[in-house]
Image: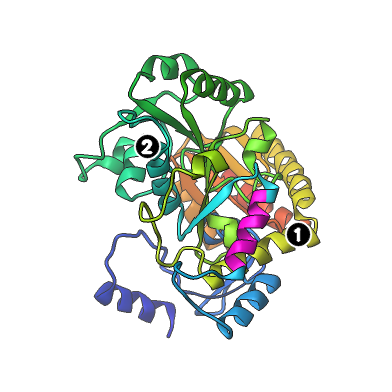
Amino acid sequence: MNSQQVIELFERYVIGNYRRFPVCLVRGEGSYVWDAEGRRYLDFFPGWGCNLLGHCPRRVVEAVCQQVATLIHVPNTWYTEPQGRWAQLLSERSFGGKAFFCNSGAEAVEAAIKLARAATPKGRYKIVSFDGSFHGRTFAALSATAQAKYHEGFEPLVPGFVYAPWGDLDTVAELVDDQTAAIIVEPVQGEGGIRIAAVEFLRGLRHLADERGLLLIFDEVQTGCGRTGKWFAYQHYDVVPDIMTLSKGVCGGIAGGVMLAKPEVAAYLRPGMHASTFGGNPIAARAGIATIEMIEAEGLLDRVEVLSQRFRQRLEELARHCPLVREVRVLGLMIGIELHVPGSPIVQACLDRGLLINCTHDVVLRLLPAMTLTEAELDQGCDILEEVLLQFVHQA
């Protein structure tokens, strides 16, 4: 089928809750994808950040194929070696926590919210989150998301969530009361525009949580698993959360989610209190193991730093001679380019030239490229982006 035929199929049978580009993708390899007509695109936003290792990474593909031929699914009333091994690898690379497995970032956040309420004294249920945050679209995760545009049409939300301005420790301290259980924060707000937390802010939250007997939850759905050049973004700050949520890149493109919690906190989630039918299934577990093994075998954490510096150099140079660019923000391979103008036309123009990027918060171009990107691909993409932006300058 060609792209138009697939689009017509969707229009007839698929709910139209996504804004889709009029392109049907059929194949991916590394940082490239191809459409049904055979056109190739350079992907600087692979899988919405899920394809951390690029499209179809060999180690993940081999692990999944082997597992599919061995054991596809069993319920969590049985033990499987891959799930236990995956938990061990994540624990050893983080803060020694225990894992609850699920299928998405929203599910991981839901689990974290339930655990925070279960692990604090009765009567404590409120959770502080931050303006510009994004924690998912299921009801508790949506309620924690402090953006009114996502709430419209779904009120009333789950009670108990209060919002503080991003980076404002004084307001957080004022919002905390005897009913507060936890604080949830993204070390880098991804959907919120690649806003990178200040060291003093996250350390202040840790101090406040300790002082007031609260749990500190880090939502690392976008930042985790090496995206920022360390296994987890909290490691840049020397601040250890009590609970951490992971998804997106954790399985190299296969659906998977994880909540990690310090053992003394994890103990409050007892049998019958929470579950996920497909969570930690053998396929996701093998993909998660292969993802970690590939990152270490190929030195990809160090690779992130090399690519990050090159992106920063290219984009800051672009900002100096392109008046459309307000600011460039980079942490590892989380890259935001804030503009003075709406970014959607820029995204479309890049697509027309064979480059896939994203726009969030209306004016922030968001790049989440693969750790396996080459320097030549990096320069190719930056050349296209520069060409497009300068063309818009000349049209203004």
Residue 142 locus on image (x, y percent) = 33, 44
Q: Nearer the viewer, mark 2 or mark 1?
A: 2
Q: Where 126 sits versus 73, above or below?
A: above
Answer left or right for 386 relative to 255.
Answer: right
Query: Which comes sooner in the sequence, label 2 or label 1?
Result: 2
Query: With 162 as the anchor, is 167 left or right in this view?
Result: right
Vertical relation: 53 (above or below) 361: below
Main SS of the magenta part reads helix
Q: Which residue is mark 2?
A: 117
Q: Quadrant of the N terminus?
A: bottom left
Q: Are marks 2 and 1 in contact (CB under 8 Å)?
A: no
Instruction: Tell me where residue 20 appears, x and y as whole percent.
Output: 39, 62
Residue picked out by circle 1: 374
Q: Is residue 357 magenta?
A: no
Circle 1 packing at 10 Å, graded few (<14), some (14-19), many (20+), is: some
> Helix, strand or loop at disc 2?
helix
User: Which residue corresponds to the image point at 76% horizontal and 45% vertical from the top-left?
Assistant: 305
Number of labels in the image equals 2
What type is the residue that disc 1 sits on? Thr
Instruction: From the viewer's perspective, tell me whether residue 295 is left or right of residue 261.
Output: right
Q: Give above or below for 167 relative to 95.
A: above
Judge by depth and name the residue closer to the eye, 252 or 344.
252
Which amino acid is tagged 2?
A: Arg
- At a point 56% along the width and 70% down the height, the residue shown is 80
Which of the numbered marks, if any, corresponds to residue 163? Answer: none
The part of the chain drawn in magenta is 82-91
Name the residue rendered at 68%, 34% in the picture.
Answer: 236
Quarter of the rendering containing residue 42: bottom right
- Please, is residue 297 above or below residue 309 in the view? below
